[in-house]
Amino acid sequence: MSSNSDDIQAAGFDTRPPMLDRTDYDSWSQRIRLYCGGKENEIYILQSIDHGPFKLGTTRDTLGTTPKGGVLLGPKRPRTYDDLNDNEEKQFDADDNVKMLLARSELTKEDRESQLYDEFERFKMLPGENINEYYVRFLKLVNDMRNIRMTMPNIQINSKFVNNMSPE
C-alpha cells in the first residue's frame, strides 16, 4: 500500500501545478508590478521587490565635537524606526505593505490584529462540528495570530478552546 508522499515522489517534477511553473515568471512579474503601480508609495514597493526589504543597519550617535572641530561618535548600535528620516520611514512602511500584499492581505498589521482579536473573541464550536474540525479551525486562528506576532497568554488561549466546546 503506497502513501500519498510516495505517489507525489513517483510523479516527479514534470507534473507540478501551474502555479509553480517557472516558465510563466515574466507574466506574473508584470502583473505584480502593474498591481503595485496604483498603490501608495509605488516607488518604494517596486524597490523592495527589486532590491529586497529595507535594511535598518547600524548608526553612531554624535556625542560632541573636539576643540579642533572633529566629531566624537558613540559606539555603533542598531538603528530603530525612530532613527529613520521621512523617506526611509516611507520605504520601511512600504516594505511592510509588500509583505502584507504577498501574504494576500491588504490590511495593515493593526487592522489584521484587530480583526483576529475580534474573531478570537467570537470563536465558538459550530453546531454539528466534531472535536477534530473544531481543533483545526482554532489552531488556524491561533497560527494566524502568531504569524503577525500577536501575543496572548497561553492560559487565555487554552481556556477559550475548552470553554467554547459544545457538549455532545
Image (spheres, helix red, strand yellow):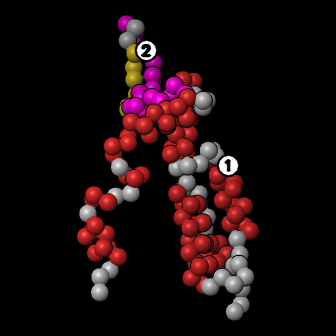
| Amino acid under disc 1 | Asp
Q: Position of residue 75 (x, y in %)?
A: 38, 31
Q: Nearer the viewer, residue 5 or 154?
A: 5
Q: Residue furthest top?
A: 68
Quadrant location of the N terminus in the rendered image:
bottom left
Residue pictured at 39% horizontal, 36% vertical: 26
Q: Is residue 70 left or right of residue 120?
A: left
Say which of marks 2 and 1 sits in front.
Answer: 1
In this picture, which residue range is highlighted in magenta? 42-68
Residue pictured at 53% horizontal, 31% vertical: 34
Q: As displayed, is residue 168 above or below residue 43?
A: below
Q: Residues within 10 Å of mark 2 (few under 14, many from 20)?
A: few
Q: Quadrant of residue 136?
A: bottom right
Question: Which residue is disc 1 drawn over?
Answer: 111
In magenta stretch: residue 101: no
Q: Quadrant of residue 49?
A: top left
Q: Is residue 92 left or right of residue 113?
A: left
Residue 80 in view here = no
Q: Position of residue 54 (x, y in %)?
A: 44, 34
Residue pictured at 55% horizontal, 54% vertical: 148
The mark total stands at 2
| Amino acid under disc 2 | Thr
- N-terminal of the two: label 2 or label 1? 2
Question: Which residue is disc 2 drawn over?
Answer: 65
Q: Which mark is residue 168?
A: none
Q: Quadrant of residue 56?
A: top left
Secondary element type, mark 1:
helix
